[in-house]
Amino acid sequence: MTTVADIRASLDTWYPPELAETWDRPGLVCGDPADSVSTVACALEATDAVVEAAIDAGAQMLVVHHPLLLRGVSSVAADTPKGRIVHRLIRSGIALMSAHTNADAAVGGVNDVLAELLGIRVTGPLERAAVGDNPLEGIGRVGQLDESMTLRDLTARVAERLPATVWGVRAAGDTQRTVRTVALCSGAGDSLLEDAARSGADVYLTSDLRHHPADEHLRAGGPALIDTAHWASESPWCRSVADRISAAHDVTATVLDVRTDPWTIGIRREDI
């Protein structure tokens, strides 16, 4: 019999909690570690639609990337947005666990999945982990593309290989510039713009870039930028963690077919 505790132990082995940022709150959110598990559902975050899909899938455990209770709350009453989810999970007998920045930093985690998907051979982290002895652990990655290409062609590759979103994929810099060395950070990564500049990369790929930090970075001579939707850069990890769980335990692990990208429409002038 596989238990919630067994799945938690594997996740903590693959994505060590000590690699998480100090502000982060990964781990088991709700559920009895002793409960048995036969089906695990995986998603980027626990939304109402995701919980509904997990119930429909007959799951006893939901594994996500984004912590539901990342910021402090004083109530999980059932008439609050987060409380509603917690109550429904508990009533449905579904444990909830997240692996967040620990999964970003770990070898084989979110950033390595993204790099592999884009044809990037990782040579090291963008920001080395403050703990542990593995030199490949840390937030973000730096690596080499499988072939040199223009910034325009790399942007097209990213758009082709990542899940499609209304946000699309944007780039900043000389579109015909040849790029080979790539720095990347899944999710919101503008806090690592200086690290990307110091890495010697030709281009930095991340999500949620803001106007002023991006503009100042480029004017300071930093690498070209590729900006993806947050959900798109992280969601490929869900398949990876589901496959790892299935291989390690006698359970069914499934990726829920629920898009949690909050953006639903994107219109350009020429589309009007």
Image (spheres, rainbow, N blue to C red):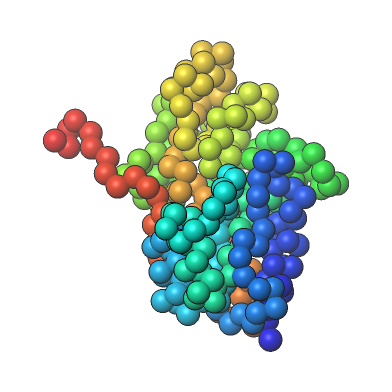
Q: Position of residue 189 (x, y in %)?
A: 56, 35
Q: Is residue 64 above or below residue 137?
A: below
Q: Is residue 197 above or below residue 80?
A: above
Instruction: Check the image and name the residue furthest to the bottom.
Output: 1
> Image check: 134 left or right of 10?
right
Q: Position of residue 159 (x, y in %)?
A: 40, 45
Observer-nearest residue: 42 or 86?
A: 86
The residue under the point 49% across, 22% down is: 214
The residue under the point 80% across, 39% down is: 130
Observer-nearest residue: 79 or 259?
A: 79
Q: Is residue 57 above or below residue 84?
A: below
Query: Residue 33, located in which quarter of the rendered image?
Result: bottom right
Quarter of the rendering occupied by the N terminus: bottom right
The residue under the point 43% across, 42% down is: 229
Instruction: Check the image and name the residue furthest to the right.
Output: 133
Q: Position of residue 153 (x, y in %)?
A: 42, 37
Q: How many marks?
A: 0
Observer-nearest residue: 203 or 218?
A: 218
Q: Position of residue 12 (x, y in %)?
A: 73, 61
Instruction: Check the image and name the residue furthest to the top.
Output: 219
| Residue 200 seen in the current view | no
> Image check: 164 left or right of 33?
left
Quarter of the rendering occupied by the C terminus: top left
